[in-house]
Structures are given as structure tokens and as C-alpha cells.
Amino acid sequence: MSTRVVSASRVVDAAPSAVFDLLADPRQHPVIDGSGSVRGVVQGPNRLRAKGDTFGADMKMFGLPYKIRNTVVEHEEDRRIAWRHFGGHRWRYELEPVEGGRTRVTETFDYSMYSPLKARLIEVAGFPERNRRGIEATLDRLEQVVRGDA
């Protein structure tokens, strides 16, 4: 595995289809985002259905608001979905069925496509560790939402 990949997994008490439905609805991203950076969906479909679909989001980082446009780059119904923006890195969710109707959800921040210099800048800025904490919090929130606790 690349050192330019940050990921974590969690088994949640929901079927892969229920988890995928949540992830494929951009309006739910602010609800499950554990990083605190996704503030709202600007525009896009109610459901991401295929590679090439796009959606915009209101974001906030380091106290500064901004807008971002994302493109779906991986889409396999009930198994995998990923998007990227102009920076090129990917946010990926992989779903694996687990006994008892549960799902192992793996969220990944993948910046392996960056040049060594750009990757080093990402690392010096602390994004891998910041994103690791955000991923853990997102998985917590995702689990609460699919269980109906949120």
C-alpha cells in the first residue's frame, strides 16, 4: 500500500445497499462529514449514479469558506464510490458485506498521484494526520446515521 494513502475501516450494522445509498446522496455528505469542512451541497444530483457525475459543495477549512466541484471517478453500486476535485486526490469508500447483514466500510484519502514535491507539501501541512482523524469521525457519524441514531 502506498504511503500516500490514509484509510480506516469500520463494520456497521447496515447492509451495503443502505450505506451506499447514504454515500451516493451528496446532500448527506455534510451530515456524515467528521472533518467539519463540508458545510453544504451547492449543486448536483440527489444521487450519484455513475462515473462522471459531478456535485459541488460549500466547504470551510482553517476558518475560510470556499466552494469545490467534485467528479465521481469510481462507481460500483453497493461496493465502491470515489470522487476527486481539481487537486486530483480521491476520497474513496469501499463496502464489503459482512456476516449478519453488516458492512465493512473503508474510507480512504488517496494522494498517491501527486509528485514527490506536492506530496511532501501535503504532508508538511499535516493533511494526512488531519484527514485520518476526520475519517475516523466520519465513520462514527456514518454508523450513527445508518443505525438511525443521528
Image (tube, rainbow, N blue to C red):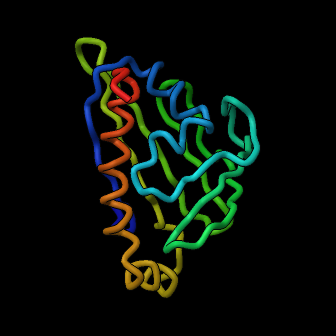
**Who's the residue at 69% across and 50% down the image?**
71
Total count of labels:
0
Residue 120 x %, y %: 42, 84
Residue 111 x %, y %: 48, 66
20 lies above or below 35: above
Residue 5 x %, y %: 38, 62
Quadrant of the rendering where the N terminus is positioned: bottom left
Q: Quadrant of residue 94?
A: top left
80 lies above or below 60: above
Quadrant of the rendering where the C terminus is positioned: top left
75 lies above or below 98: below
Residue 43 x %, y %: 76, 44
Residue 47 relative to residue 99: left or right? right
Hey, which residue is sitting farthest top in the picture? 100
**Who's the residue at 71% across and 51% down the image?**
56
132 lies above or below 43: below
Residue 102 relative to residue 88: left or right? left
Q: Quadrant of residue 139?
A: top left
**Who's the residue at 42% across and 22% down the image?**
16
